[in-house]
Image: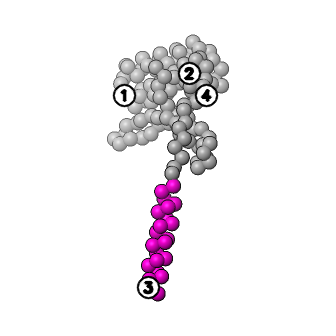
Amino acid sequence: MRCWRSAGSVLLLGLLAGCASERMNTTTYSSPIRTQSAACQLYAQAWVEHFRASVAVREGRHGDSALHKQAQARARLDQQQIDEDCYKPYCLIQPKAEGRLDTYCGYKVPDTSGQELYRWIPWTDLN
């Protein structure tokens, strides 16, 4: 009887190990911004720069440099006069230790593999 229990345990462990070793979907997702027009790419880059600069100014980090970057990004947004239908990334503020703030931006895109509802594609600067 003990033999059957041991055999059953080994079989169960084997099945669990087989399930755990299934390959994960390694589909690579490219950034959606790469499919946008050049004007929309510039708009999205300025959008991200403006967001980052705004957070840096609020935090008091980088002082004049952040204010200058913020002014440049705002000017680019005004100059382009592009309809805001361009595919802009999501930008979020993440609190850090000692009251510091960090930002990250990216795209939430549908997961075509079916494993998840969405995938997060981090923003990479275009310039």
**CB atoms at circles 1 and 4 under 8 Å apart?**
no
> Which label belongs to residue 38?
none
> Which label belongs to residue 87?
4
Q: Which amino acid does label 2 sit on?
A: Gln
Element at label 1: loop
Judge from the rendering whether residue 52 lies leftward or rightward of residue 44; answer left or right: left
Q: What residue type is labelled 4?
A: Tyr
Q: Position of residue 53 (x, y in %)?
A: 44, 25
Element at label 3: helix
Specify start and end residues of the magenta stretch as a single range. Answer: 1-22
User: How packed is label 3: few (under 14 Cα within 10 Å), some, or many (20 or more)?
Assistant: few
Circle 3 is placed at which residue position?
A: 2
Circle 2 is placed at which residue position?
A: 41
Gap between marks 1 and 4, in whole Å? 29 Å
* Residue 43 in view here: no
Circle 1 is placed at which residue position?
A: 61
Gap between marks 2 and 3, in whole Å? 67 Å
Nearest to N terminus: mark 4 or mark 2: 2
Is residue 40 positioned above or below 3 on the image?
above
Gap between marks 1 and 3, in whole Å? 68 Å
Front of the two marks 1 and 4:
4
User: How packed is label 4: few (under 14 Cα within 10 Å), some, or many (20 or more)?
Assistant: some
Is residue 38 positioned above or below 106 on the image?
above
Q: Which residue is drawn at 46% across and 20% down?
A: 127
Judge from the rendering whether residue 73 lies leftward or rightward of residue 97; answer left or right: right
Q: Which amino acid does label 3 sit on?
A: Arg
Q: Residue at x 44, y 39 (%)?
A: 94
Q: What residue type is labelled 1?
A: Arg
- Residue 55 lies in the magenta-colored region: no
Nearest to N terminus: mark 2 or mark 3: 3
